[in-house]
Image (cartoon, helix red, strand yellow):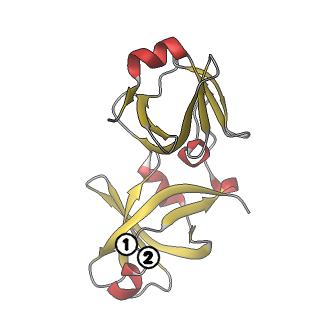
Amino acid sequence: MSFITIGQVLKASGIKGEIKVKPLTDDPKRYHKLRLVYLSGRPYRLLGVRIGGGFVYLRLADVEDRNAADALRDRLVEIDRVNAVPLEEDRYFISDIIGCAVSLSDGADIGRVTAVSPAGGADVFTVTDGRRTARFPFLKKLAVSVDTENKRIVLDGKIFSEVGIYED
């Protein structure tokens, strides 16, 4: 079974087993259509979903109190890939981008994608090679090719030098 990550559990919410989730999807309302999610490979039937303040709150079967909910802290919320919504052209699941090797059109390796953060008009990619960390907005004009199946992204070197920054 292949999973797609759609959120991350932040903490327990209240005393009745509800969990607070940071959504990792463009449209958190999609949670309302789900019947089943996976945390660490274990399936949980959804009993309730509410959205507020940019977060999703879930009630899961077999999670009946705060202690059980708190035990799920930091776990990824996943769905079976067959239940994922179809993506438009040139759109990608964050979970497919994480781990991709990133290089420039001249062959220089930048590192691997370790995080994708939504930021206005373009997601910001964080890439590290173990020594240095680079961040850049993922712009159409920057991407030469994106191959999520082979986990490779090639960027235009000239544009990367204009929009990419390295942490000191």
Quadrant containing the C terminus in the rendered view = top left
Task: Name the residue: 47% across, 68% down.
Answer: 75
Seen in the picture, residue 30 relative to 104 is either above or below; the reply is below
Q: Position of residue 165 (x, y in %)?
A: 37, 27
Q: Position of residue 53 (x, y in %)?
A: 25, 54
Task: Name the residue: 35% across, 87% down.
Answer: 67
Task: Name the residue: 62% across, 30% down.
Answer: 153
Quarter of the image for residue 18 reads bottom left
Mark 1 touching mark 2, by CB under 8 A? Answer: yes
Q: Which of marks 1 and 2 is in front?
A: 2
* Amino acid, disc 1: Ile
Name the residue nearer the viewer: 87 or 99: 99
Name the residue nearer the viewer: 19 or 31: 19
Name the residue nearer the viewer: 140 or 62: 140
Q: Can residue 65 be seen in this view?
A: no
Which residue position holds label 1?
A: 19
Q: Where is residue 31 in the image (x, y as percent from the top left)?
A: 48, 58
Q: Can residue 30 be seen in this view?
A: yes
* Amino acid, disc 2: Leu
Task: Name the residue: 66% across, 34% down.
Answer: 152
Q: SS class of the residue under badge 1?
A: strand
Seen in the picture, residue 166 relative to 1 is either above or below; the reply is above
* Mark 1 surroundings: few (<14), some (14-19) or many (≥20) residues within 10 A: many
Q: Is residue 141 left or right of residue 90?
A: left
Of labels 1 and 2, earlier in sequence is 1
Q: Tally the numbered discs.
A: 2
Which residue position holds label 2?
A: 72
Q: SS class of the residue under badge 2?
A: loop
Q: In this view, does 106 lie to the left or right of 2?
A: left
